[in-house]
Amino acid sequence: MMESLSEEIPLEGRYRAFKEDYLKTGMCDPAFNYSGDRRLALLVSAVKTDLASVCPWGRQADPRFFDELKLKLGMTASESAEAEKELANCSRAATSGNTDAYYLASARFKVRASKMMLQKFRSVPETLPPFGAAFIHKKMESLKMVRLTPDGRPDCDSEFVSFDAFSKAVQGYEKLKKAGKLPANSRYLTIVDYTKPSNSRRLMVLDLSTHRVVNQTWVAHGDGIPELTDAEKEKRSRMRPRPTPFPSEKGGSDRFGSNPKTGNEHKSNLSSLGFIRAETEYNGTWGRSLKLHGLESGVNDQMLSRGVVLHGWGVDQMSWTSKESFMKGVNEIASLGALDGKSMNELNSMDGRMSSVAFSEVNNATKGCLGVSEEPVRVRQQDGTFKGEKNQRDLLIELLGGKSNGVQSAPSLIFNYGGVNQKSPYFE
């Protein structure tokens, strides 16, 4: 009954209802799902992105960011001396030509900085000191993850899906349902806005029967690299030891991957726009995954045969080209002792899960699939409250695949949005 009534409400009214719900939940703040240790990991991840540029391979370390970091963290003289010593070691190793020495020195420097951050921002489970929270938001703003209002709070209006994307998605949902291409009891509509960068939370799940936003998260895009030639392989080998996974520039118009190139061809590794129906769950190369069936001829109808799926993107997909060398450094520093009950080894794994999709400017591309974080997130219940946590990948697979909170429903619809000029027979 609820859905038949909602179809009678103008699109503008339905859009307002979803947005009001979204703003009320506080979901627009990326810290919404990250409490306690995970919020500390969020901070560590953000700063480690900058630390990676402080001591780049082949060049002298740049002390300017480190000077700012010392100021932000309020380092003591002894802490500053320790960190500067590690930075100097990293700088020497970066120009030595010895990759193992560089990885070890880089790991030592990053873990040393991480240790100081954890000590400075130690917190109770649900909160961070005001300075810590402001620092997190500022780092997220610099990484294009969230816009801030003049008073330093997340700009929630800009985080919500655009009306154009919403109206196209809802029109298509209703036409596909009437055409029998979606089950009658399908209730979820997922919008992926590819006009936003991939380190923005551009995937949003809407419950059309309740006008509630169920989930919002990061999602990767297709890298658009058909196959590597021998020359390209050689070129990448020379780039090491810089992290060199699939460069997002190949699949997107900027280094953060907004407006990725799209297509429908086999072996293209491109994202596909348009309407997609969730299919069966299976266990594949990426672990637990969900098959996807494109519903638009010539636009995305090869997705199933191309093997384009929704899968998780966890710590095993970290961007280090020599993860073993990096972990060697982490393990050495781990002898410094546990921090807040977490060893540095555990911290690195936690940071890897956090940063894989959300923060890395190169680790945001897949082979055309929808890659999502595997970090635990809050679960929205049927009554609108948030209760319990679940792996982000598992939550989406269950929601979109037709099983919500243990209740069997129906496969849902996904709409990959590419902008105001996007065409489809399923919307005007």
Image (spheres, rainbow, N blue to C red):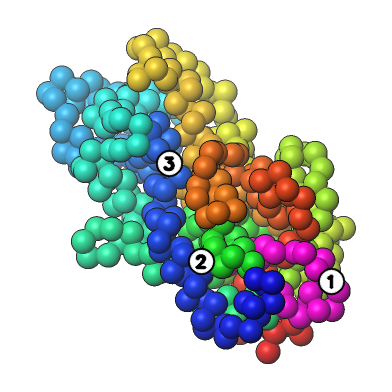
Q: Position of residue 67 (x, y in %)?
A: 19, 39
Q: Is residue 335 visible?
A: yes
Q: Residue at x 62, y 77 (%)?
A: 6
- Quarter containing the C terminus: bottom right
Under mark 3, the amino acid is Tyr
Closer to the chain start, of discs 3 and 1, is: 3
Q: Residue furthest bottom?
A: 428
Badge 1 element:
loop
> Pointer 2: residues within 10 angstroms few (<14), some, or many (20+)?
many
User: What stretch of residues is rendered in magenta?
Assistant: 172-194
175 is within the stretch colored magenta: yes
Local SS, label 2: loop
- x then y, percent, for residue 141: 34, 56
Q: Is residue 316 left or right of residue 133?
A: right
Q: Residues within 10 Å of mark 1 (few under 14, many from 20)?
A: few
Q: CA distance from mark 3 to mark 1?
A: 37 Å
The quarter of the displayed image where residue 180 is located: bottom right
- Label 3: which residue? 34
Circle nearer the viewer, 1 or 2: 1
Instruction: Determine the residue located farthest toward the left in the rendered image.
Output: 77
Amino acid residing under circle 2: Lys
Foreground residue, 32 or 2?
A: 2
Which numbered disc, 3 or 2, marks the residue that appears first in the sequence? 3
**Nearest-to-viewer mark from 3 and 2:** 3
Which numbered marker is on residue 196? 2
